[in-house]
RNA sequence: GCCGUCUUAGCUCAGUGGUAGAGCACUCGCUUCACACGCGAUAGGUCACAAGUUCAAAUCUUGUAGACGGCACCA
């Protein structure tokens, strides 16, 4: 069989996925071992609006590595895929489409039609990411694909909602919430981000005290053209003629239209006499009181604060304490409403702001405007400035669930985060300060809240409309028009995807769906740190509450893949790297193993060269296999041939030892989610140990058609491919199937009846008993020797065409080793004769070197450049001398010798002695040249 | 304001108390019959800075500087 000269990822990528999927290899049912332990992962469901980005590629790689690794180990493995309905995102897409295609607004077609269009949109475009996951090679069980708005998952949502409501954990209330005027919906605190605005302004407004002003309340009406002529006093009050003012500062002047008080600190001497007095609120014709409240910091600003209970969370609380009216002056699109007065009604908030300021100025009531750096809350998705607004919404009390989660962490350390620092602490302290969760959203796409109202506004929460009507005694009802926060349904993901619907009460014990019983708790959750609060914590809480189970034991938090500029990838920065482009350029496998080579949790700047490295690695694997296949007609990988037979050469014993060391290390690394460690071990084992040394050492036998040698090489490749498979599924399958002798016989015992695939081959465990310390030491001595000879040739500029003999002096044991490997040493050192003795007996015109086990010399009559050789020796002496003096300094420190562990001290002493001998040898070599 | 992370070779990154590592780039040499996406040989680092703990610090502690993240506040 002859392979192409270079690996072409495309062919392999097209060859296998469909077969894997069609053969049911991704399904847990492929496992025929009734006693198999389960291993399960649920995918963080990507938005149906999404397409694959590098963060997905990273997370999917890790999940697939774990899944494939465990599957090969014989676990009954399930990686469950799915998508999230992504309320706001889909709604926005459909609104855009409607506008573009039909110039219509949602209201024009009505809710029912709109939702129909949204489903249609989802059917049409929602598969993008699932198709891309196939390209990635993700070994998910597509037959268990779930969507958060599937009937069964929606049933779970309704039942959870009703249960929480019946318990009193869900309530409806009037609160200050984050309002996005563009999306026209409320947002949870977590969906609000901050943006710093450097050119912000702080406006100082004068509020006249009632009964003191020269001007009548009427003159403070909007558009009054009368200005004032005032003198200002420090401390925020001003007097002009008969008029006294209280000056307040605000960044949002338009909200003054909704002010219902001015608050001062109770202990503020400057204002004590004003408490209880009234203010004539300009532009409104309203009178509002001056009140005292501890909330006010006398030191800050003017010490007097305008109170707008309907437009600020702190003011809202002050308002509650003082029973102030809550005057809402804005519409849901952030234009001013009727309450703002006829002059302002209908104006956008920012236009209204300018107008308020202008009018204050005209009235002489604008004291000053300061530049003020301000951070503004913005909508996470559309970046619109979020307006704090008084609104009636649904909330979940989090106290009980928070305690469930905190107990899990404290008593069982669940979930165990990787990396543990800093996530465990951040997660815990977030929980400790958890506030109620706003769960209603003013959207049409999503799970409509199962609450109905009668004409009088009485609410009936029920699982179905019929049940609600029943509760209402047959009255006509109207369902709440809001839907639930997308994260409410994804919070149930760990159990709703396994068939839990909450039909039988809480379904805690009875009639569990089989998948729930089989796969919950899941083993690990892999996700990014941006949704630890939004999703991870809620899934832990809701799963514990509704199933009594742990959602997942471990939680791997991946780092962020940054753009080449070191900033997070984003459309606006245009620094994104498309995984699909990388797949096309370097191959899926190279991209995957590169992503896996990033330290767990670490951020990384994207670097094409990293992927290129592993593209080259893929090619190396391809070519090593190619070489093997070129010489192995009729042979087969035979594990027995790698066993510890006496006839094995040093190189054979050594590669077996290295293989087992590697397998043990890889398994250990994967168990602790140290993917980069596993990758590094595999990379260096395959490239350095196997290709650079083992293949080169056995080449002559292989090319000579030595059956035993070839099948040993085949076996090492076969085992390596298995270990590489979780990282590089396509390449390894492509090659594995081509190896002679591969069949389902090599499968893990759980899959013997399945068609042959490396996916189901037994993952090498590695055996400590197969680690051969002597072989490692001896091989190291041989390698060391060869490297020294190569160094002489390179440094002396001796062409490989020139063969020379190599003299070696060593102790009896090492003499045996070198003798036994004479042929290999000659071949790799490109020498023609090896002379091994107790002492070196060479002419003066020789290049010399020392290793830890030998002295060596290469006679170079007529070829030697004495200056260069002296220089070479001096360099070596300098190096060894430096190391020795460092050791001797340590050894001459009495404290070190007394306090350091004996082993350590002995080790250093030995090394020092060794170095002394080597230096003496080199110095005498050098002396003979002088 | 509070909490936290990072700073290691030209670049991108590993490394957690005991002689500083990788890939790429650089230098030198190789059309060696698997691979130039390759082979061989070099060179390159007072591990941000300062103080401390220790026989011993890139690694632990504290501080400083710079980069970044989360939370809170923002009249």
Image (cartoon, coloured by chain):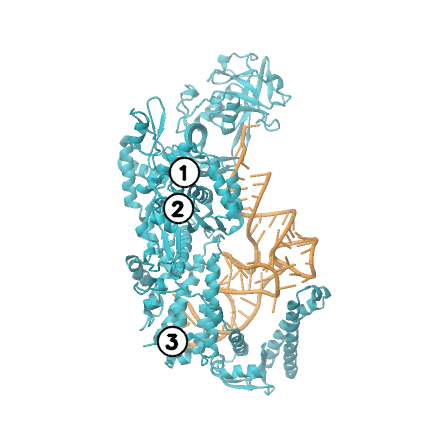
Q: From the viewer's perspective, is residue A506 above or below residue A705?
A: above
Circles 3 and 1 in contact, beta carbons < 8 Å = no
Rendered location of residue A104, percent (x, y):
28, 33
On whether disc 3 and disc 1 are found on a single subunit, the reply is yes
**Which residue matches tag 2?**
A494
Which label sits in the foreground, 3 or 2?
Answer: 2
Disc tally is 3
Circles 3 and 2 in contact, beta carbons < 8 Å = no
Quarter of the figure that contains the N terminus of chain A: bottom left
In the depicted view, which residue is nearer to us: A591 or B49? A591
Colour cyan, chain: A
On whether disc 3 and disc 2 are found on a single subunit, the reply is yes
Identify the element where label 1 is drawn: loop
Instruction: Answer with the quarter of the image where residue A214 lies.
Output: top right
First in sequence: mark 3 vs mark 1: 1
Residue drawn at the location 51% of the way across and 46% of the way down: A409
On whether disc 2 and disc 1 are found on a single subunit, the reply is yes
Badge 2 density bin: few <14, some 14–19, many ≥20, Cα 10 Å: many
- Please give the label number shown on residue A711: 3
First in sequence: mark 2 vs mark 1: 1
Rendered location of residue A841, percent (x, y):
59, 88
| Chain at numbered mark 1 | A
Q: Colour of chain B?
A: orange
User: Relative to residue A599, is residue A273 drawn left or right?
Assistant: right
In the depicted view, which residue is nearer to us: A246 or A482? A482
Quarter of the figure that contains the C terminus of chain A: bottom right
**Which residue matches tag 1?**
A382
Residue drawn at the location 63% of the way across and 79% of the way down: A922
| Chain at numbered mark 3 | A
């Amino acid at each position: 069989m002859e392979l192409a000269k270079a690996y072409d990822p495309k062919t392999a990528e097209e060859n296998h996925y469909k077969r894997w999927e069609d053969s049911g290899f991704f399904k847990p049912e492929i496992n025929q071992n009734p006693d198999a332990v389960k291993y399960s992962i649920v995918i963080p469901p990507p938005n149906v609006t999404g397409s694959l980005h590098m963060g997905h590629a990273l997370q999917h790689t890790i999940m697939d590595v774990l899944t494939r690794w465990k599957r090969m180990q014989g676990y009954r493995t399930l990686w469950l895929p799915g998508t999230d309905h992504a309320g706001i995102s889909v709604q926005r897409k459909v609104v855009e489409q409607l506008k573009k295609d039909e110039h219509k607004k949602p209201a024009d077609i009505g809710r029912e039609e709109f939702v129909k269009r949204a489903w249609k949109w989802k059917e049409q475009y929602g598969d993008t990411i699932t198709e891309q996951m196939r390209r990635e090679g993700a070994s998910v069980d597509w037959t268990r694909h779930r969507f958060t708005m599937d009937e069964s998952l929606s049933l779970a949502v309704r039942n959870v909602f009703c249960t929480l409501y019946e318990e009193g954990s869900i309530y409806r209330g009037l609160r200050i919430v984050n309002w996005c005027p563009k999306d026209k919906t409320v947002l949870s605190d977590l969906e609000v981000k901050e943006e710093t605005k450097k050119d912000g302004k702080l406006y100082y407004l004068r509020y006249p005290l009632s009964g003191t002003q020269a001007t009548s309340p009427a003159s403070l009406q909007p558009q009054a053209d009368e200005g004032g002529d005032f003198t200002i006093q420090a401390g925020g009050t001003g007097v002009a003629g008969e008029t006294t003012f209280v000056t307040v500062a605000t960044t949002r002047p338009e909200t003054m239209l909704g002010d219902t008080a001015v608050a001062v600190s109770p202990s503020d001497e400057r204002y004590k006499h004003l408490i209880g007095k009234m203010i004539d609120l300009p532009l409104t014709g309203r009178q509002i009181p001056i009140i005292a409240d501890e909330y006010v910091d006398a030191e800050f600003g003017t010490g007097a604060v305008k109170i707008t209970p309907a437009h600020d969370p702190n003011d809202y609380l002050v308002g509650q304490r003082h029973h102030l009216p809550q005057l809402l002056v804005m519409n849901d699109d952030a234009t001013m409403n009727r309450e703002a007065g006829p002059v302002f009604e209908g104006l956008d908030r920012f236009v209204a702001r300018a107008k308020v300021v202008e009018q204050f100025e005209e009235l002489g009531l604008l004291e000053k405007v300061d530049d003020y750096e301000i951070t503004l809350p913005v909508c996470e998705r559309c970046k619109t400035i979020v307006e704090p607004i008084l609104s009636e919404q649904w909330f979940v009390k989090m106290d009980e669930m928070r305690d469930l989660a905190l107990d899990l962490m404290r008593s069982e350390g669940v979930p165990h985060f990787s990396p543990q620092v800093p996530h465990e602490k951040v997660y815990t302290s977030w929980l400790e300060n958890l506030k109620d969760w706003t769960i209603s959203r003013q959207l049409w796409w999503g799970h409509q809240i199962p609450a109905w109202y009668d004409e009088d506004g009485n609410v009936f929460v029920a699982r179905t409309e019929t049940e609600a009507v029943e509760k209402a005694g047959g009255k006509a009802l109207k369902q709440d028009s809001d839907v639930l926060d997308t994260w409410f349904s994804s919070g149930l993901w760990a159990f709703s995807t396994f068939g839990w619907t909450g039909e039988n009460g809480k379904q805690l014990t009875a009639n569990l769906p089989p998948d729930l019983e089989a796969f919950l708790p899941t083993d690990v959750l892999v996700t990014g740190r941006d949704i630890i609060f939004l999703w991870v914590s809620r899934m832990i809480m809701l799963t514990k509450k509704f199933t009594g189970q742990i959602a997942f034991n471990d939680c791997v938090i991946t780092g962020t893949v940054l753009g080449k500029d070191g900033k997070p990838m984003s459309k606006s920065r245009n620094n994104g790297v498309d995984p699909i482009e990388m797949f096309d350029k370097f191959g899926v496998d190279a991209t995957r193993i590169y992503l896996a080579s990033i330290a767990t949790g670490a951020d990384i700047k994207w670097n094409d060269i990293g992927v290129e490295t592993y593209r080259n690695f893929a090619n190396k694997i391809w070519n090593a296999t190619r070489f093997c296949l070129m010489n192995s007609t009729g042979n087969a990988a035979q594990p027995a041939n790698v066993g510890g037979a006496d006839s094995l050469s040093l190189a054979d014993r050594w590669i077996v030892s290295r293989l087992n060391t590697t397998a043990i290390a890889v398994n250990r690394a994967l168990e602790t989610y140290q993917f980069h460690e596993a990758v590094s071990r595999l990379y260096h084992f395959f490239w350095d140990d196997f290709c650079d040394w083992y293949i080169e050492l056995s080449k002559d036998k292989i090319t000579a058609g030595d059956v035993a040698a070839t099948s040993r090489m085949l076996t090492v490749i076969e085992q390596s491919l298995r270990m590489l498979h979780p990282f590089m599924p396509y390449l390894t399958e492509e090659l594995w199937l081509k190896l002679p002798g591969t069949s389902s016989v090599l499968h893990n015992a759980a899959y013997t009846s399945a068609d042959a695939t490396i996916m189901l081959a037994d993952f090498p465990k590695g055996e400590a008993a197969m680690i051969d310390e002597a072989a490692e030491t001896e091989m190291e001595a041989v390698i060391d020797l060869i490297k020294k000879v190569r160094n002489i040739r390179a440094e002396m500029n001796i062409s490989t065409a020139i063969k020379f003999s190599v003299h070696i002096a060593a102790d009896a044991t090492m003499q045996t080793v070198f003798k036994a490997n004479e042929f290999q040493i000659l071949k790799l050192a490109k020498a023609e004769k090896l002379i091994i003795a107790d002492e070196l007996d060479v002419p003066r015109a020789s290049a010399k070197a020392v290793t830890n086990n030998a002295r060596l010399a290469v006679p170079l009559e007529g070829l030697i450049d004495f200056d260069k050789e002296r220089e070479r020796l001096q360099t070596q002496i300098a190096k060894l001398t430096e190391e020795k003096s460092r050791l001797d300094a340590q050894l001459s420190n009495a404290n070190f010798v007394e306090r350091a562990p004996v082993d350590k001290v002995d080790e250093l002493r030995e090394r020092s002695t060794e170095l002394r001998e080597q230096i003496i040898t080199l110095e005498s070599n050098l002396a003979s040249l002088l």
